[in-house]
């Protein structure tokens, strides 16, 4: 995956396996927090955390550690997507509050099906991009065409790689400081 120097301090951690990408993201966030960086937003909860809350899928508010289920209960034997669009929409208040705190980095757990359709966290992501706050999200390869259209091709795409994440962040912060 080729990395260019885009106009926006926005990046996508591109993956074939969400769990694999999430592990890199969790470690990256911990590294930055250990440097006293103000990292806000929402991350995808580990599956075992969601199951402990009796949910199939959830997010965690980085400012409070609060868990929020974003899954509908469709029954024990259901194999359909359980994502609850209303719960994701309601969780947008977390990102709105985070934006107001001028974080060093804002994390949005996913650019997925809802965002690709203009729903979910799409509006909040556009606001973040317009403000110039560095933002990082996770994007499945199957949603890359929609992501590229959504960002106008101005976002960096990063494979799950710690050094590449840190390099992008350092460049994004330098760009923000020079703006």
Image (cartoon, rainbow, N blue to C red):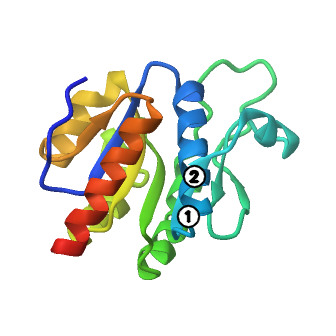
Which is more toward the observer, 71 or 166?
166
**Around disc 2, counting alpha carbons within 10 Å, would you say few (fewer than 14), some (14 to 19), or many (20 or more)?**
some
Q: In the rendering, at what x and y percent does residue 82 appear?
A: 62, 33
SS at circle 1: loop
Distance, label 2 to label 1, CA atoms, is 7 Å
The single residue placed furthest to the bottom in the displayed view is 100
- Residue 163: give x, y in percent of width and height: 41, 37
Residue beneath the point at 41% across and 78% down = 102
Whether residue 115 can be seen here? yes
Residue 167 position in % (x across, y down): 33, 45
| Image side of residue 36 versus residue 96, left or right | right
Indicate the quadrant where residue 172 lies.
Answer: bottom left
Front-most of residues 124 and 90: 124
Does the image show residue 122?
no
Badge 1 is on which residue? 35
Which residue is found at the position 19% from the left and 56% from the top? 8
In which quadrant will I find the C terminus?
Answer: bottom left
Secondary structure beneath label 2 = helix
Task: Determine the residue positioned at 35% across, 53% down.
Answer: 169
Residue 13 in the figure: left or right of residue 149: right
Contact flag, marks 2 and 1 (Cβ < 8 Å): yes
Name the image quarter holding residue 143: top left
Name the image quarter holding the N terminus: top left
**On screen, residue 37 above or below 11:** below
**Image-quadrant location for residue 127:** bottom left
Name the residue rendered at 73%, 63% in the picture.
Answer: 66
Residue 25 screen position, x and y as percent: 53, 42
In this picture, residue 150 sits left or right of residue 124: left
Q: Name the residue under label 2.
A: 31
């Amino acid at each position: 995956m080729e990395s260019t120097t885009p106009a926006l301090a926005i990046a996508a951690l591109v993956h074939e396996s969400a769990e694999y990408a999430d592990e890199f993201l969790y470690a990256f966030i911990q590294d930055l927090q250990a440097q006293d960086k103000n990292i806000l937003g929402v991350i995808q909860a580990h599956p075992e955390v969601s199951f402990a809350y009796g949910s199939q899928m959830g997010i965690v508010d980085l400012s409070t550690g609060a868990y929020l289920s974003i899954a509908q209960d469709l029954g024990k034997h259901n194999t359909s997507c359980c994502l609850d669009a209303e719960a994701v929409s309601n969780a947008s208040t977390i990102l709105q509050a985070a934006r107001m705190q001028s974080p060093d980095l804002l994390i949005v757990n996913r650019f997925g099906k809802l965002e690709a359709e203009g729903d979910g966290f799409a509006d909040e992501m556009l606001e973040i991009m317009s403000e110039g706050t560095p933002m990082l999200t996770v994007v499945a390869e199957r949603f890359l065409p929609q992501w590229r259209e959504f960002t106008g091709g101005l976002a960096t795409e990063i494979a799950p790689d710690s050094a590449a994440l840190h390099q992008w962040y350092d460049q994004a912060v330098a760009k923000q400081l020079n703006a």
